[in-house]
Image (cartoon, rainbow, N blue to C red):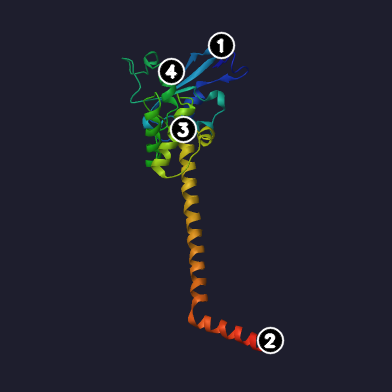
Amino acid sequence: MSEIDGARPGHLVDPVETLAALRTVPEVQEAVVTQRPGTGGATMLLGYVTGPDPALGTVPIRQHLSGQLPDYLIPEHLFVLDQLPLTLDGDYDVDALPEPDESSAAADSYVAPRTPMEEQLAAAMEDLLPVARVGIHDNFFAVGGSSFLATRLTTQIRQMYGVEVLLRDVFAGPTVDELGQLIRTHQNRTAVEERGYRRQRRKEKAVRYVTGHPAVLWVLRRARSSKAEQRG
């Protein structure tokens, strides 16, 4: 057990607790937790697991851990590996585990699209941005987007889905997940408004039919004639 200096003063970090929590994550088959020197003299936890689909990213794992552990016991970097390296004696080879870098940090937060709409939105962003792939929680502006590119994105969204997403909407919700929710809201609202419009049109048509029916016109003429006779 060691005490973290700097970023997490006063907290005792026990990798055993983190390891036990990782092993309760659904689909995790094996897990290893190590410690590495971090920035500013702090110590960071690194987690390595096998079993989960790498395409799903590590967000589901973090969500599971957040319900069991305090923040300082959740690994700063998580790696989903095909298998954990072993020594000749059959123990886990800690020295052969990957170290975190910029690419692993990006992969650590990647969550693949879940629906056809999210796949289309991610592909549209990837065409505009200088990145190989865009996850559903990646911030458009944090991975190379600009106001100009965001304007082009709104044009693509209008062409793909027929809804008007404004530049300020992209700033307010710059991820695939948030833009997908906004598009669905627009689509649902349009459908509701269309149904309301059609109901109103049917009512107006029914009123025109009734008021133009010969029997109704005869009654109206008789009523006008009766009023004229009374005045005379």
Q: Nearer the viewer, mark 1 or mark 2?
A: 2
Residue 15 position in % (x across, y down): 50, 21
Q: What residue occupies the far left of the structure in this picture?
A: 88
The numbered mark, 3 or 1, whose residue comes first in the sequence reads 1
Q: Is the C-beta separation of discs 4 and 1 under 8 Å?
A: no
- Element assignment for label 1: helix
Q: Which quarter of the image is occupied by the N terminus? A: top right
What residue is pinned by disc 4?
102
Amino acid type shown at disc 3: Thr
Q: Nearer the viewer, mark 4 or mark 2?
A: 2
- Element assignment for label 2: helix
- Element assignment for label 3: helix
The numbered mark, 3 or 2, whose residue comes first in the sequence reads 3
What residue is pinned by disc 1?
40
Q: Note whether 19 is above or below 203 in the view shown.
A: above
Q: Note whether 156 is above or below 109 in the view shown.
A: below
Residue 151 is tagged as 3
Q: What residue occupies the far top of the structure in this picture?
A: 41
The numbered mark, 3 or 4, whose residue comes first in the sequence reads 4
Q: Is the C-beta separation of discs 3 and 1 under 8 Å?
A: no
Residue 51 position in % (x across, y down): 36, 31
Residue 102 position in % (x across, y down): 43, 18
Q: CA distance from mark 3 to mark 1?
A: 40 Å
Amino acid type shown at disc 2: Arg
Q: Nearer the viewer, mark 3 or mark 2?
A: 2
